[in-house]
Image (cartoon, grey):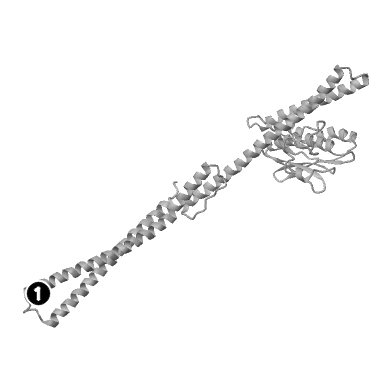
C-alpha cells in the first residue's frame, strides 16, 4: 500500500487557504465599494429632496451633477481597488513566507547539506522544521552523514593500522634475519672456535627461524580470517569435552613452568556450534600469552559457563596484568603485553586472531582487569 503523501496534502491545504483568503478579500472589497456607493447616493437623494428641484432643474445642471457622480464613483472604485491590491500583496507575502518556511527553506538546507557531503564535510547535519516527508529526508540524511563520518574515521584508522602493521612486520622480520645473518657470518669467518658455542649458535638460529615462521603463519591466518570469502565451517559438538582436552594438554605445560592451573568445566554435555580447529587456536593463544608474559607462581584459570543464549569461556590469571593504556588496542595486530618490540617475544598476533575467531562464530571477546586479567569469549548457541 502506497503511504500517504503528507507534503502534497499540506501544499493543497495551503493553496486552498490562499484562494479562500483571496475570495474573502475580494468579497470584502466589493462589500466596501457597494456600501460606499449606497451611502453616497443616499446622501445625494436626501439633498435633492431637501432642495425640491425635481421640476425646475435645468438640464445643464443635471448633466453637471451626473458627471460629478461618475467621478465620485470612479474615485470610490479606485480606492476599493487599491485596498484590494494592498490586502492581496499582504496575503501573497504572508503565504509566500509560510510556504518558504515549510518547503523552500528545507529544500535549500538539503541542497547545502548535499553540497557539504560532496565536499567531504561529513560532520554537517540538517536541522529544520518541516512536514513529514521533508522531516524524514532530514532524518535519513543525518543518518547517512553519520555513517559516512564513521566510515571515514574507520578508513583512516584502518590506513593508519595498515601502515603501522607494515612497519611492525618489517621490524619483526628484519630483527631475527639480522641476527641469523650475523651468526652465520661469524661462523663463516671462523669466530666460533668451539663445538659447544657452535651448537648454541645453531640453536639460536633455529629459534629465530621458528619465530619468523610463526610470524608468517600468523599473518597468513589473520589474512584468511579477515577475508569475507574464507569458508568458516562450524559443527554442533560437545564444548565441555573440547575444553577438557585443552585443559589436559596445558596442565603439564603449566606444571613445567611452575604455574598453578585451575579449571572449572561442567560435567554435563553442552552442545554448541563451533569450529574446533580455530577455537582451539583462539583459546590456546590466550593460554600461551599467560605463560609467556607472567612469572612462575601465577595462577591461571580456565572456566566454561552457560549464559543466556550462549556460553562463555573464561581465561584468567593473577599475573602482572595489562597496562590501562593498552586495553583499547590489546586486540590489534602486533600489540604485545610488554609494549616492547622484542625479537624474542611473541608475534603480537595471538589476541588479534582470537578476536577474529570468536567474531567468526558470531560472538565477542572482552577483557576485564578488576584484580586479575580475564578474557571472556562468548559464543552463541545458535550461529
Residue 93, given in percent of the width and then of the height, sits at 37, 59
Residue 64, given in percent of the width and then of the height, sits at 12, 72
Looking at the image, can residue 187 be seen? Answer: yes
Q: Nearer the viewer, residue 346 or 273?
A: 346
- Residue displayed at 73% across by 32% down: 168
In the image, taking residue 48 as reference, residue 255 lies left or right, namely right
Specify the quadrant of the image occupied by residue 27. Answer: bottom left
- Residue displayed at 89% across by 23% down: 200
Specify the quadrant of the image occupied by residue 55. Answer: bottom left
Residue 320, given in percent of the width and then of the height, sits at 84, 43
- Residue displayed at 32% across by 64% down: 87
Tell me how many marks there are: 1
In the image, taking residue 86 as reference, residue 270 lies left or right, namely right
- Residue displayed at 87% across by 23% down: 203
Question: Label 1, on which residue?
Answer: 61
Q: Nearer the viewer, residue 58 or 282?
A: 58
Looking at the image, can residue 237 be seen? Answer: no
Q: Nearer the viewer, residue 244 or 158?
A: 158
User: Badge 1: few (under 14), some or many (20 or more) residues near its Cα, within 10 Å?
Assistant: few
Residue 319, given in percent of the width and then of the height, sits at 85, 42
Specify the quadrant of the image occupied by residue 260. Answer: top right
Query: Measured along the vertical axis of the image, is residue 123 above or below residue 224?
Result: below
Q: Nearer the viewer, residue 1 or 226?
A: 226
In the image, taking residue 24 as reference, residue 60 lies left or right, namely left
Q: Secondary structure at mark 1?
A: helix
Query: Measured along the vertical axis of the image, is residue 295 above or below residue 67?
Result: above
Q: Which quadrant: the C terminus?
A: top right
Amino acid at each position: 500500500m502506497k503511504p500517504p503523501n503528507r507534503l502534497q496534502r499540506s501544499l493543497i491545504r495551503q493553496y486552498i487557504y490562499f484562494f479562500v483568503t483571496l475570495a474573502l478579500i475580494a468579497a470584502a472589497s466589493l462589500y466596501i465599494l457597494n456600501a460606499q456607493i449606497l451611502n453616497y447616493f443616499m446622501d445625494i437623494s436626501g439633498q435633492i429632496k431637501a432642495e425640491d428641484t425635481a421640476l425646475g432643474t435645468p438640464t445643464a445642471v443635471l448633466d453637471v451633477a451626473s458627471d460629478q457622480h461618475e467621478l465620485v464613483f470612479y474615485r470610490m472604485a479606485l480606492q476599493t481597488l487599491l485596498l484590494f491590491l494592498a490586502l492581496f500583496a499582504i496575503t501573497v507575502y504572508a503565504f509566500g513566507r509560510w510556504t518558504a518556511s515549510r518547503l523552500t527553506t528545507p529544500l535549500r538546507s538539503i541542497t547545502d547539506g548535499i553540497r557539504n557531503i560532496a565536499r567531504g564535510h561529513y560532520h554537517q547535519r540538517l536541522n529544520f522544521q518541516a512536514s513529514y516527508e521533508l522531516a524524514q529526508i532530514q532524518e535519513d540524511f543525518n543518518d547517512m552523514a553519520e555513517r559516512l563520518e564513521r566510515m571515514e574515521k574507520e578508513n583512516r584508522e584502518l590506513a593508519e593500522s595498515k601502515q603501522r602493521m607494515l612497519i611492525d612486520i618489517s621490524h619483526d622480520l628484519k630483527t631475527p634475519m639480522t641476527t641469523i645473518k650475523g651468526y652465520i657470518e661469524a661462523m663463516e669467518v671462523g669466530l666460533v672456535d668451539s663445538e659447544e658455542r657452535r651448537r648454541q649458535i645453531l640453536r639460536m638460529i633455529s629459534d629465530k627461524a621458528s619465530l619468523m615462521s610463526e610470524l608468517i603463519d600468523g599473518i597468513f591466518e589473520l589474512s584468511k580470517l579477515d577475508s569475507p570469502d574464507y569458508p568458516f565451517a562450524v559443527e554442533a559438538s560437545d564444548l565441555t569435552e573440547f575444553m577438557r582436552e585443552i585443559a589436559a594438554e596445558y596442565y603439564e605445560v603449566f606444571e613445567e613452568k611452575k604455574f598453578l592451573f585451575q579449571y572449572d568445566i561442567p560435567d554435563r554435555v553442552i552442545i554448541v556450534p563451533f569450529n574446533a580447529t580455530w577455537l582451539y587456536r583462539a583459546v590456546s593463544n590466550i593460554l600461551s600469552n599467560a605463560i609467556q608474559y607472567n612469572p612462575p607462581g601465577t595462577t591461571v584459570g580456565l572456566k566454561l559457563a552457560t549464559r543466556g543464549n550462549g556460553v562463555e569461556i573464561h581465561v584468567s590469571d593473577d599475573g602482572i596484568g595489562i597496562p590501562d593504556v593498552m586495553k583499547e588496542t590489546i586486540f590489534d595486530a602486533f600489540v604485545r603485553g610488554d609494549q616492547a618490540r622484542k625479537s624474542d617475544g611473541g608475534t603480537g598476533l595471538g589476541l588479534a586472531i582470537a578476536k577474529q575467531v570468536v567474531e567468526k562464530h558470531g560472538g565477542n571477546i572482552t577483557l576485564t582487569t578488576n584484580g586479575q586479567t580475564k578474557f571472556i569469549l562468548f559464543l552463541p548457541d545458535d550461529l
